[in-house]
Amino acid sequence: MANTKKVLIAGGLCGATMLMAAEKVEDACRACRIPVHVKVHNLWESAYPGQGFDVIIEMFPFFENESCPVLSGKPFIIHQNEKALVAQIVGILAGDGEGTGPVSPREAAV
Amino acid sequence: MIYLDHASTTPLDPRVAAEMETLWGECFHNASSPYAAGRKAKEIKEAARQKAAMAIGAHAEEIIFGSGGTEADNLAIKGAAWALEKQNGRKGRIMTSNAEHHAVLSACHWLEELGFPLSVLPVGTDGTVKPALLEAALAEHPDTVLVSLMWVNNEIGAVNPVKTLAETAHRHNALFHTDAVQAAAALPIDVTTTGVDYLSLSAHKLYGPKGTGLLYRREGAPLEALLHGGQQEYFLRGGTENVAGIAALGKALELAKAEMPARQAHVERLKRRLLAGLGGLDGWRINGGGHKNDSPAILNLGFAGLDSAEGLVLLCDHAGVQLSMGAACNSQSVEPSHVLSAIGVPPEMLNSSVRVSFGQGNTPEDIDTAAEVMIQNVTRLRRA
């Protein structure tokens, strides 16, 4: 069985949005048989959410110089391009070539 | 930490704290009790009422103490509406603006649900209500019995021409209430010269404690109680009085009146310094326009190129500068501030605006640091 992938969804006051986003990522990974653990983190409580993530979703620009891809979670807030973002996350976790380096948050938000 | 969120709440002035500390211990007695200690508590409460009245140009018996600004707004609006309904035998119209604090807006909308007609006037791009607009609205709606318009806007610092607005309301036989909670921090308050009928104040916005406020009610202005169950505050606010809190409010108002010219000048200097400090940054604006007449204590800034203000406020917090934002995302939508929407802030800045509010504890060096931190983080977020 493949190693469990770690996803971080980090933001602030949009707690409900982050929980809903986590559910969508978990559902998509389950459908693709990718074992995943999604952590939701409130950056107001701590600026240090831990490490070792395979992909980070930030609800507003926060992370810099991370070793894993960082994507903007804005599609989850505005409910536009959500499916494309979830597909991108799954693609990175599946290692199909989309996760080879940090991704511009703006790129995901467009 | 550099605290620049005084419009949210102010730190307790040590002189006010000292006043309270003595009372918490020594003077716990009920101000309605007939024995000596109770009478002493009552004396302290009445002395505070005298101080508060003198600070705003009122008579002592025109002051009704309560828990804060929200209660004072609710008491003024609901209490006046009900009293006038009782007096006139019909539900009179309430008039307010779309930039009011929710303590006013929600109270008005609640009355509307009970059958009171409501008119919500639009503010201009500077955040103020134009007297001519009020005049026309009152002429169109002669059933108006109460006008409630804030003195200083809590988000952008716009200052309404309260005296003229009150005169306009009176010309049309309507009473006038003003929420002066933000005004008390940086402007002199005088109910006599402005001619208002009701005025709300909160202690914690003027270096007093939370949980205490007052409503000024002009002698003879109709008012029904919201809280029943005691004879306190002329039967208009039942409940055992918070004597220490009331004494603190009296002291805070006394200090505010004595020190107002210096307080105004101080925050005005800080505001100008911050604007100068941000001068090197492009793509920002003062929401509301930054007029000479605005409150010197409040500044609302919109930054182009940011997805939301939350990232900026959070990064500034991590860098030791505490600001406030007017909007937050939720699961269904991104809700912009109703005030920024009302003044026509461009859509791209509705969710990327922050409020900076200055206080007596801030120094010019604090402001230089804050400007530097804001520039660094706006630049960082724009790069993202």
Image: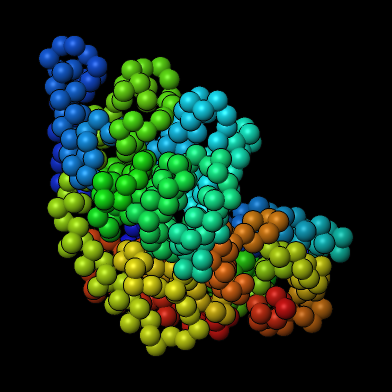
Which residue is found at the position 68% from the left and 59% from the top? B333
Number of numbered discs: 0
Q: Is residue B156 left or right of residue B140?
A: left
Q: Is residue B216 left or right of residue A82?
A: left
**B84 or A85: nearer the eye?**
B84
Which residue is found at the position 33% from the left and 36% from the top? B217
**B38 or A70: nearer the eye?**
B38
Quadrant of res B211: top left
Which residue is found at the position 53% from the left and 50% from the top? B138
From the top left corner, tell me how far across and down residue B307 is, in percent: 60, 73
**B230 or B57: nearer the eye?**
B57
Q: In what quadrant of the picture does the C terminus of chain A appear?
A: bottom right
Q: In what quadrant of the picture does the N terminus of chain A appear?
A: bottom right
Above or below, comparing residue B138 to residue B216 in the picture: below
Q: Is residue B165 left or right of residue B38?
A: right
Above or below, comparing residue B325 to residue B302 in the picture: above
Quadrant of res A29: bottom right
From the top left corner, tell me how far across and down residue B19 is, in percent: 15, 38
Does residue A48 appear anywhere in the picture? no
Above or below, comparing residue B354 to residue B184 in the picture: below
Which residue is found at the position 87% from the left and 60% from the top? A31
**B138 or B243: nearer the eye?**
B138
Residue that lies at the very extreme toward the top in this rendered image: B34
From the top left corner, tell me how far across and down residue A25 is, in percent: 76, 61
From the top left corner, tell me how far across and down residue B50 is, in percent: 18, 35
**Colouring chosen for the image of the structure:** rainbow
Does residue B180 appear anywhere in the picture? yes
